[in-house]
Image (cartoon, helix red, strand yellow):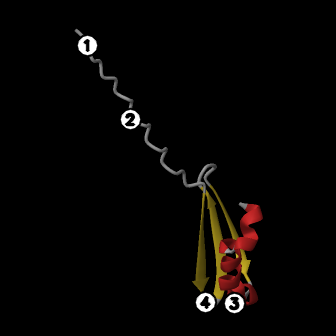
Amino acid sequence: MQTQTQTQTPAPAPAPAPTLVYSAELVEEGGVYTLVVTDRIHGTVQTSVVPQRAMDKLPYFLSLLNSRQSAAFR
């Protein structure tokens, strides 16, 4: 008589939840743009005034981050 044993493979561990490291906000007040970057790990905040010229180029800068050209930085 043969006995069959079934082994169960353990379920894979769930993927770890992503950790928010930095967050950034671009705030406009009275025609002045301010970039506010929060370091969520250390609880620090840095701000910088963003010139209008940089604001005008923001879509271009974002497209660079998403382009294949930036693959070397990933």
Quadrant of residue 52 in the image?
A: bottom right
Q: Position of residue 18 (x, y in %)?
A: 52, 51
User: Which of the pair 35/63 is nearer the observer?
Assistant: 63
Residue under pointer 3: 56
Residue under pointer 4: 30
Q: CA distance from mark 3 to mark 1?
A: 74 Å
Q: Position of residue 15 (x, y in %)?
A: 47, 44
Q: CA distance from mark 2 to mark 3?
A: 50 Å
Q: Secondary structure at mark 3?
A: helix
Q: Tag 2 or tag 4, which sits nearer the N-term?
A: 2
Residue 11 circle label:
2
Residue under pointer 1: 3
> Looking at the image, is mark 1 or mark 4 nearer the viewer?
1
Q: Residues within 10 Å of mark 1 (few under 14, many from 20)?
A: few
Quadrant of residue 14 in the image?
A: top left
Specify the quadrant that holds the N terminus: top left
